[in-house]
C-alpha cells in the first residue's frame, strides 16, 4: 500500500466564480487524489486533499499555477490525519 498524506488547504485570491472547484476536482481525479473542496463565505476556498505525497504535491502545484481565470495569491497548507477508506474527491456546496 502506498504511503498517503492528507492536507487541509485554504486558497485566497481570485478563487471564487472562476471555476477553481471544478479545476481542482478534475486534477484530483487525474492524480488519484481524494478529498473535497468548498467555497467559503469570506471569499476563500477550503479543501482537504489526500493521496501520495507526489500526487498531492502535483495537485498543489496545479492549484498555485491556476489558469487564465484562476489566480491563487496564497495557498495555506497544513498537514492533518488521514481519512481511512476515502474513495472520491467531491465538490461541497
Image (cartoon, rainbow, N blue to C red):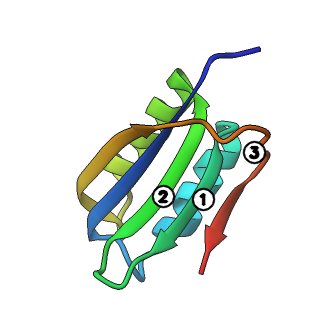
Give the residue displayed 28% in from the left and 51% down from the top.
Answer: 75
Give the residue displayed 43% in from the left and 49% down from the top.
Answer: 8
Judging depth in this view, the residue of 84 and 25 nearest the camera is 84
Name the quarter where the N terminus is drawn: top right
Whichever of labels 2 and 1 marks the residue nearer the N terminus, that label is 1
Q: Which residue is mark 2?
A: 47
| Pointers 2 and 1 in contact (C-beta within 8 Å) | yes
Q: Which mark is residue 77?
A: none
| Pointers 1 and 3 in contact (C-beta within 8 Å) | no
Q: Secondary structure at mark 1?
A: strand
| Cα distance between the residues tagged 2 and 1 | 5 Å
Q: Which residue is mark 3?
A: 86
| Cα distance between the residues tagged 1 and 3 | 10 Å
Whichever of labels 3 and 2 marks the residue nearer the N terminus, that label is 2
Q: Secondary structure at mark 2?
A: strand
Give the residue displayed 35% in from the left and 41% down from the top.
Answer: 78
Q: Residues within 10 Å of mark 1 (few under 14, many from 20)?
A: many
Judging depth in this view, the residue of 87 and 31 nearest the camera is 87
In the figure, residue 41 lies in which quadrant? bottom left
Give the residue displayed 46% in from the left and 67% down from the top.
Answer: 20
Q: Which residue is mark 1?
A: 36
Judging depth in this view, the residue of 7 and 69 nearest the camera is 7
In the figure, residue 18 lies in which quadrant? bottom left
Amino acid at each position: 500500500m502506498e504511503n498517503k498524506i492528507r492536507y487541509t488547504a485554504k486558497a485566497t485570491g481570485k478563487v471564487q466564480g472562476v471555476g477553481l472547484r471544478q479545476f481542482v476536482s478534475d486534477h484530483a481525479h487525474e492524480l488519484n487524489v481524494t478529498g473535497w473542496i468548498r467555497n467559503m463565505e469570506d471569499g476563500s476556498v477550503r479543501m482537504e486533499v489526500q493521496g501520495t505525497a507526489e500526487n498531492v504535491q502535483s495537485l498543489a502545484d496545479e492549484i498555485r499555477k491556476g489558469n487564465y481565470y484562476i489566480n491563487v495569491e496564497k495557498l495555506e497548507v497544513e498537514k492533518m490525519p488521514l481519512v481511512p477508506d476515502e474513495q472520491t474527491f467531491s465538490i461541497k456546496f
